Amino acid sequence: MNLDFVLNCDILVVGTGIGGLVATKKAISKGKKVCLVTNGKFCGGASYFPLKGTLGIQGTDGEKDKELFYEDISKIGNKMENPHMINTYIEDICDSISSLEEIGFEPWLRNDKRPACFAKYPRNIYLIKDWDKARQKAKEIFGKLENLEIIEDSSILKILKDNDKIMGAVFQKDKKFFAINSPVVIMATGGVAGNFKHKLYPEEITGTGHIVALDAGAKAQNMEFIQFIPAFLKPKYNTLFGEHTAKYCLGMYSLDKKLILDGVNSPEYKDLWIERSGYAPFSFDFKSHLIDLKMVEFDDEKNQGVILKYSEDLYKDEGEFYRVYLDWLKNTMGIDMCRDEVVISPFAHSCNGGIKVNENGKTDVDGLYAIGELSSAIEGANRLGGNSVGGALVFGKRAVDDANIYLENYKNKIYSKEDFEEKFNSWLEEISLNDKVNKLSTSEVLENLKSITTKCAGIKRTKTSLEDGLKSIELLRNQYNIKENLDSNSIETYLRLQLSKMLIKSMLTREESRGAHYREDFPYTLDKTYKIIISRKNNEFILEKEYLK
């Protein structure tokens, strides 16, 4: 494998969502030369994927609210949260809101305080919208910055090290391979939803950054806690379902119009629907998770989705949260919840776990940082609404501050093209050892992989289905030749196969139900708690239970 070229910089940032842009802007302000690389287009990822009219970020108002915010985060984390990061986040979040303006957004404070998704207490919520406008503004801002190289449509394949020090990384763009020489790599590559058939995420968010970070020596945790949020199959596919509308739902029906579950008019189910209207993602921690399980029961390959029918009272609710959502739904998406047939299904969304980092976004590897949804930040078994964008702001800035200190004591070394080629080709030989006769194209592997991941790693999980999933992934690998498909992104495809394998192994290891993780064969939560810590050695996963006090 020959590299086309090698670029040099002080800090390499991978990902151009909010986290990647905030980190880049701050690094440039500190006088660093930055390479900013994305596997899509500039201003991409979940940050610029318009699921609904606005995105929110919670902000504290006074010392008492900081205590209540900590309580909200830790309670909903259900013992899987990361306490060492929560206080840092709460202290920094309000000052970090202004970072959105620096990258092209125009945040504003809501008129009313209200509890965010999963939160018990109401607090200030800052909103952003107008994704196209923000994207255009970001292009203007970053287009004027010196010491910045932006490279689009390039997938990271491997972070290389020399004596445990970061050298940089190798990328693929179309049929060409190149390297970036950098002592610091800030990964902001997003979550894992792209490996599922239905997802409230862009196609390019595939989780390969997790495997790249693990192969570089980082660790991951909480990967079994993936949010699944109901979204529209019809009348407009891949549109976010507003959970607050559930308290006006008259019933759930199969596609052949048979009643599955009575709605709010039923004394038996009224409280369930009202509780379900208070949070978006599936969570075993609430009794109303039974609504989601009913949905999944009638949502399989044969019968796609369930129908919800609504009371006309929905459009009489004058609450701001209702008006903003329903107006956006009608005016932008052309959907009327009472007039149209609403068909919904669970869609993969945020990953609550990720790469293990400290309060500065630093991994166990010097010079390697993980921020945004790639990282396991403050969240646990559930994710509190508004903290996803907030985490990208806070830890994106802190990662650069920490990296700057690291660079002050770093002896700069420029590696040659041959240095990168030697190490990269050695790794390529390792992962190609199991290459056999090629029977599947890259597109066929990826389509099969999405089906496998969706089928066994969705809301309902069992030992049998998870083990079957691992066998199916291994079968895919045995029918796919990495070296013969290099020009069609076979290395990235290999990383995606590994990502799904890691998710399934994590789900298989947790023999209980907690938060976003549900095991049909273990429908209870254990008193004794542990985190599943994942590492990689010789291209194989190592999973260990870390018991908590």
Image (tube, grey):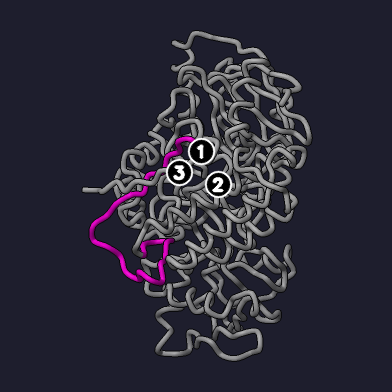
Residue neighbourhood size for the residue with mark 3, other residues' Cα within 10 Å, grouped as few (<14), some (14–19), many (≥20) = some
Residue identifier under label 3: 541
Q: Are marks 1 and 2 in contact (CB under 8 Å)?
A: yes
Kind of residue indicated by mark 1: Asn
At a point 52% along the width and 22% down the height, the residue shown is 161
Q: Residue furthest front?
A: 437
Q: Specify whether 145 is left or right of 355.
A: right
Q: Secondary structure at mark 2?
A: helix
Q: Nearer the viewer, residue 204 or 277?
A: 204
Kind of residue indicated by mark 3: Phe
Which of the 4 image quadrants contains residue 288?
bottom left
First to last magenta residue range: 513-539
Q: Residue furthest left?
A: 549
At a point 36% along the width and 54% down the height, the residue shown is 77
Point out which mark residue 539 bears.
1
Tag in front: 1 or 2: 1
Residue identifier under label 2: 498
Residue 269 drawn at (x, y percent): 43, 85
Q: Specify whether 443 is left or right of 352.
A: right
